[in-house]
Image (tube, rainbow, N blue to C red):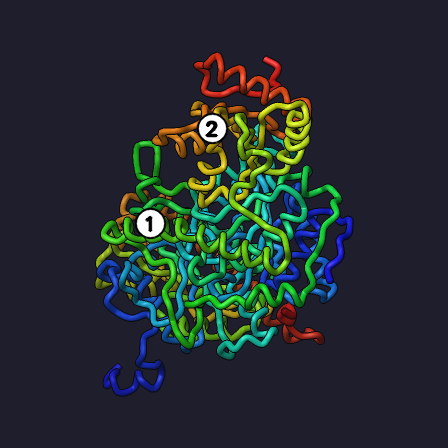
Amino acid sequence: MENYAVYVPRLVKKEDNFAPGHRACIGCGEALAMRQAFKALDNNVIVVNATGCMEIFASQFPLTSWQLPWIHTLFENAAAVASGVEAGYKAMKRKGVPLPENTKIVAIGGDGATSDIGLQAISGAMERGHDFTYICFDNEAYMNTGNQRSSATPFGAMTTTSPMGKKSFGQFSWKKNMPEIAVAHNIPYVATATHGYPFDLMAKVRKAVDTPGPAYVHILAVCPTGWGSATDTVIRQSRLAVQTGIFPLYEVENGVYKMSIDLPKLRPVTDYLKIQRRFRHLSDDIIAQIQARVKLEYQKILEKADVTKRAKGKSKTGPRKAPAR
Amino acid sequence: MATRVGVEVSIALADAVKLANPDVIAAYPITPQTHIVEHLAELVANGELDAEYIPVESEHSAMSACLGSSATGARTFTATASQGLALMNEVVYVAAPMRLPIVMAVANRALSAPLSIWCDHSDMMSVRDTGWIQIIAENGQQCVDNIICAFRIGEDKRVLLPVMVHLDGFNLTHVIEPIELPEQSEVDKFLPPCKFPLPLNPDKPVAMGDFAPPIIFTETKWAQEMNIRSSKKVILEIWNKYYKAFGRKYSPVEKYHSDGAKVVLMTMGAIGETASVAIDEMVAEGQSVGQIRLRLWRPFPFEELRESVKDADVLIVLDRAISYGGPGGPLASEVKAAFYDQVKKPKIISFVGGLGGRDITVAGFKDIVKKGIEIAKSGSKKEYEIYGVRE
């Protein structure tokens, strides 16, 4: 965009609640996504952070990148801590303790904290209907400890605990579908986003936080260090993940699916795979399997979006309401 | 004026929590603690207690929710036991260094395996080094009084630490005792509202739980240690204030016929009341025996302990837990450490008994004292005696 500096201030605020000066790796997609997410929000937010890259690189005592009230306790419990923060505010407000109005609670965690070790706490907090937003910054492995596989690591990807070898082609399982797990909790808002589409990401985070009840945003964050890719291709990789159909952008509002981007034709997955070292070893056969799976999964989402679109048109009762809480 | 009524200890404890007017209760069911949180859920459901009750999906999340709630400045309570305490162990460690004044009732129960729902102290020993203040109640009244005191102790600006109140599972939780529940107005006078100094608040952002590099880690740990050590003074002060307000006195080491006694039996928890009956009988028989009961496990009351057995030649310590492959009973090792460098000290004899709900009767305690005296005379090479075991 020409005259970017002139136009952008109209679209996003200048202040950063996640400030620069942190210790993230060069080209970190997660730090970028986090900056975008918190640019979308006001100052009325309490952040609950799970252990992981984002916590380590932004909060080394005595420094912090956070301009918001922020709490980190453990790896797997961010959603449970957020439940407590929400309950504490709710009870104290009801009892007349002077507290700021309209305080929002945002819990953040990586893919390990979300789809592996913290899944139970997230499920519990969603099921109980706390008014909070959980954002997963998914860089597809345990990057903070040095690139070990998680259940969010894509099929075939090489990590330090899913290495390529004579008897292994890398990650042996398909990526766990966290957004669908969130949808299965019947929460009012679920969305996927990635930092290559910043305005989409910001709009979704804003919407999630403004939604009463639990909301879940799953953000794909490119990790050049772990993925073995050039730091100047971080935005491109994020967009390719979407354009190949590997990471579809959509939202699910009160059970209604909606695609966020219209892609008449998906690009071949190789466009995305070939620029990352973690996929370099893959045989044509494995790539063909990935291509088939991506097509199938993408089709499933398209159908859900289509079905719910039609159902919405016919429905007399309208979409489900958020649980009263 | 408060009246004394017969009530189940768990219910009375929950009523004491209600009197403290907590904002958030996060809990998960586990025997023998469940009656406490069931009653609290009922009080909230009936509108008798204005609090958020979070029925969490595990004890790990129970304590995690407590961290979050306490960090907002809300008065926070939970209760657990045994496996629940073990599951939340990781989170229990976080509360003290983050200075979050959560109050937790622990209905002491054995740890698996083999599975046992009955009382011993292995669960409370597993959290010994978590930095919490640990108070041990011996009967229902002490549970009620110490729950109320726990909130005031933990939330005191000089302390700001989480507090556990231990009560023996079944031996206390499920028995009906005559208990005097204070009036709400009296408790309101004694317990000021919770004023957490640096809560999570968008108007004044704070960062809690930063990552500490080696250059600062030791200092944070030393600050934590100084903090709990200096809390004893405040605990004594608050117990004293409670005595003035409610007429019931608490001290870290409670003495029973121990002044001047040559042989002293040391107990912790509900079993101490049975031991007292044995002591009564032995005193009546003309023996020079007494008893001390520990009320405060952390911070450990070294001075009070030494003072309380200054006349004794033999100190028999009864543990309801084992440190496997180690010195035996955790309480006895603590006591031995307290006397190691003392010039005048009693001979310390360690017994382990009452594991997994095994009862020790009045006759049993007399037997323990008799055996203890014999061992003290003859000298034993064994680290400890396990009482009543079929070998």
Q: Residue furthest right?
A: B6
The quarter of the displayed image where residue B242 is located: bottom right
Instruction: From the image, tell me which residue sits under label 2.
Output: B323
Marks 2 and 1, how far apart at CA: 25 Å
Of B189 and A309, nearer the camera is B189
Counting from the top left corner in percent of width and height, residue B55 is at 62, 55
Q: Amino acid at mark 2?
A: Ser
Residue A264 in percent (x, y) is at 43, 69
Residue marked by disc 1: B221
Measuring 35% from the left and 66% from the top, which residue is drawn there? A34
Q: Residue at x 59, y 55 (%)?
A: B243
Letter of the chain that mark 2 sits on in the rendering: B
Residue at 36% from the left image edge and 65% from the top image edge: B207
> Which SS class for mark 2?
loop
> Where A57 sits versus A212, above or below?
above
Q: Position of residue A219 (x, y in %)?
A: 41, 63
* Other-residue count near label 1 (Cα within 10 Å), few / some / many at <14 / 14–19 / ≥20: few
Q: Position of residue A6 (x, y in %)?
A: 26, 87
| Placement of the N terminus of chain A among the 4 image quadrants | bottom left
Tell me which amino acid carries mark 1: Lys
- The answer to whether mark 2 and mark 1 are in CB contact below 8 A is no
> Which quarter of the picture shows residue A263?
bottom left
